[in-house]
Image (tube, rainbow, N blue to C red):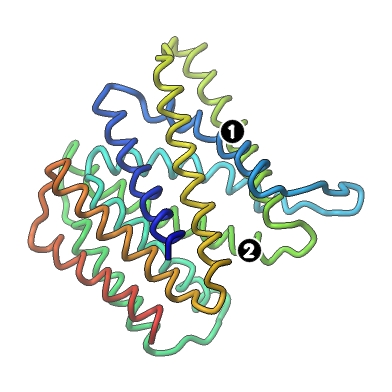
Amino acid sequence: MLYVLLSVLCSVTVSVIIKMAKNRGFKHLHLIVWNYPVATLMTYFFLKPGQIDFSQAVLPWHLYIPLALLLPVIFICIAYSIEFSGIVKTEVAQRLSLFIPLMAAIFIFHEEMANTKLIGIGIGLCAIFFSIGWHKRSGVENMRWIYPALVFFGMGVIDVLFKKVALYQQVPYSFSMLMVFALAMFFTIVLLLFRVVIKKEPINIKSVGWGILLGLFNFGNILFYMKAHRALPESPSVVFTGMNIGVILLGALIGVVFFHERLTLYNKIGLALAVISVLIIAYL
């Protein structure tokens, strides 16, 4: 369970870094750009994807390119969600995005699923409703639910695409991760150059350091989660439950205690339902 704990800590620390960096005036894009060189290098050195015979292997570009575009876009949405809605709601939206691939399995791939899983999905959707708050607002207040909603759907789509990558047998999964991160790095650097050259947006050198720190913890989350599954191959439900509930509860604790985020009664109900839905999906 040590790897699960480390993965949870890294995941929540990513949100804390984004929150603290914004409070210090750093732009979200600048942080996220420098996250991807770190992710690319760490994937190469720690996951050791090895060599690929490009004359033999057919790379799934139809999966790589959407992922490379979606990852930074949704990462930026996560950053804005943390800014406008707080760590608590953002973590719930991220963790419960697991229902998107579950629903895709039912409605797109026509897979059979136990009734208990369907109940878990229903409770999870209620949790999202209570946690985010889908009522009409105006102006900046709209951002309090729009960005968490984008995070929920976006992370779900990313999860579906990564699952399809994992099923692609011609290329090792670690190599696919390297390709996706490298492409995401390319796209974000192009976007940053556009902002700097065309829009004359200055780069604060300190944002590079914060971005590297963000990348280290973001990759740490991925690495320790993978190690947790390898350490507990017979207990995937334990890893799944520990990770999702751990992030939701620790994120709530950090958000409320250290950043004074206010939770309404509906938000608290949403948190409780989120935990219940994860338990149902994992164990029933």
Q: Is residue 44 left or right of residue 56?
A: left
Mark pair 2, 1: CA separation: 21 Å
Vertical position of residue 125 compared to residue 37: above or below: below
Quarter of the view holding residue 272: bottom left
For the C terminus, give its image quadrant. bottom left
Where 144 falls versus 281 (above or below)?
Answer: above
Quarter of the rendering containing residue 227 = bottom right
Q: Nearer the viewer, residue 223 or 67?
A: 223
**Mark linked to residue 78:** none
Question: Which residue is at a point 68% across and 53% down the rendered structure image?
Answer: 174
Q: In this view, which residue lies farthest toward the front?
A: 2
218 lies above or below 171: above
Instruction: Judge from the rendering whether residue 187 lies leftward or rightward of residue 81; answer left or right.
Output: right
Give the residue type at disc 1.
Answer: Met
Q: Which mark is residue 164?
A: 2
The x and y percentages for residue 218 are: 46, 44
Q: How many labels does the image show?
A: 2
Q: Report which residue position mark 1 lands on.
A: 185
| Circle 2: element type | helix
Measuring from the top left, give residue 134's x and y in whole percent. Answer: 21, 57
Q: Foreground: 69 or 264?
A: 264
58 with respect to 227 (left or right): right
